[in-house]
Amino acid sequence: MAVTDQTQIQEHTTRTCHLRVYRSSAGNGDGHFDEFDVPVDGCETLLDALRWIQLNRDHSLSLRHSCLHASCGTCGMRVNGREELACVCKLAEHGDEIRVEPLANLPTRTDLVADMGPLYDHFPDPHPIIRVSEVLPAARRPDGHEAYVRLEDCLECGLCVSACPIGAPATGFVGPAALAAAGRLLEEPRGAERDDVLSWIGRAEGVWQCTTCNACVQACPAGIEPLSAIIDMRRILVEQGDLDPLLQHTLQNVAMQGNSYGKSARTRARWTKGLDFTIPDARTEPVDYLWFVGDYASFDERVQRESRRLATILHDAGVSFGLLFEGEHSAGNDVRRVGEEGLFEMLVEHNLSVLREAQFQAIFTTDPHSLNTLRNEYPAYGLDKPVYHYTELLVDLVSRGIVSLSAPLTGTRVTYHDPCYLARYNQITDAPRALIAATGAELVEMPRHGANTFCCGAGGGRIWMDDSGPGERPSEQRIREAQTLDAIDYFVVSCPKDLAMYTAAAQTVGDVSFEVVELTALLERALSDRSRSAAAAPA
Ligand code: SF4
Ligand code: SF4
Ligand code: FES
């Protein structure tokens, strides 16, 4: 919309949108929010609304824009916590209350204008992620040096960097945009030495920092997939044997024992000891559900208690379920994400051969990482059974009255952390919330929730690597985010790794007023009749 048109927007419109807009003078530490009621009619995009504010309410509001059609990449900002280009961000899609902030992980110059300098700093000479310019020889530099241009499809908008939980470039992490550029350069290495690129991406600040959360892919307005490039580059490094010794050791454990802990495969089901019932072996006895437990829920002592809790809930409800016992090996989701494709295929082959021995109608798992590969990747190798997260299974059991929650946790306030591999990868956000609602507890959402969740920092094999370094860990940032909520009793998780990560993060942050609990613990407290034994076949 032309500037002159902006002034013609009628202020007596029937509908307004309330904008809370971040204001700050460069480096003054005076960040605060100003509030504006903006007429929606005539303001189709967020940029329209911000320009309306500039023209009609506050001329001093700083923002940056140019092309107005998602080409120049200059108008990136966060809208209700989500990275957007303001010029194509539809106002109507964000409700009547909109919080507008500058991009994260970059310094703020003034108001909504981020300083893109640290982003560009990851593209300069001598880093080989730029290529020799293809401009005409006459345009070459007179000093005889090569002229360089950046790879052209990236808008350099910084949305991916803002969305990244590793805090690029504040923590030194090269960041998704630069890594995507490096990946393209490896595919078409004109003007760059392949070995230089590989040593650049393989350093501590390079590809190994990535948690594979997928936020950069979902934020990118240009359809660039930094994560695919990152995993491809990890594969090359793994093939060369160029990887962290701790990670290498873990992969050897998986190869030798079928689990990342390096424990004897025979001990995989030892967590079931202490139950006052026996879980059937699905390889020898038909069951309705096959529980693919995963490494963390099997071997981590903090999580084993939660596995027993879920087993008891299901047993008491009369659900027919069984295990593969020592036959189960790591599903391989994280093995694939660190780039060990060969080992991933060996794991798939092994698990499928054992699953073929078993008789069951559907699989469930508590582990979102295992769920992701079993549900989305194993079918390409021959798995033809549905795969559920345990929250989906329990919602079904509650809705059918097989699990009855009638001891409501009235007065209990909880927040819920969506795991990336549930929410971003598999859009499973409703089932855990339905279970929390069924307990009677009040759910208070963190600013980043649902499909726009924040990563715990453990994914993509990061849990097997050294996570010390500059900056606060993502899990600690998340605990601080929950601390901004009023009077929360529980920080609820639905992923074995999350339980481990956030329990540790809460201890590190210290002085945390809530308890980190697995959702099953909340459910157990709300169960009314634990002796129920109705039949519970898959729906
Ligand atoms: S996948 Fe997540 S951690 Fe990795 S680069 Fe993208 S945003 Fe950052
Ligand atoms: S990769 Fe995508 S999101 Fe990141 S800077 Fe480039 S265009 Fe923007
Ligand atoms: S103004 Fe160019 S991308 Fe928004």
Image (cartoon, rainbow, N blue to C red):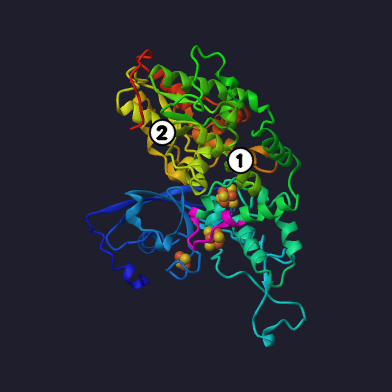
Res. 347 mark? 1
Residue name at image x 62 percent, y 64 percent: 184
Residue name at image x 37 percent, y 21 percent: 411
Query: Observer-nearest residue: 103 or 358?
Result: 358
Give the secondary structure at mark 1.
helix
- Outermost residue to the bottom: 138
Question: Looking at the image, is mark 2 or mark 1 earlier in the sequence?
Answer: 1
Give the residue type at disc 2: Gln
Res. 431 mark? none
In the rendered image, residue 234, in percent from the top left (x then y), is placed at 66, 52
Which region of the structure is painted magenta?
218-229
Q: Quadrant of the C terminus?
A: top left
Res. 361 mark? 2
Disc 2 to disc 1, C-alpha distance: 22 Å
Residue 339 visible in the picture:
no
Give the residue type at disc 1: Leu
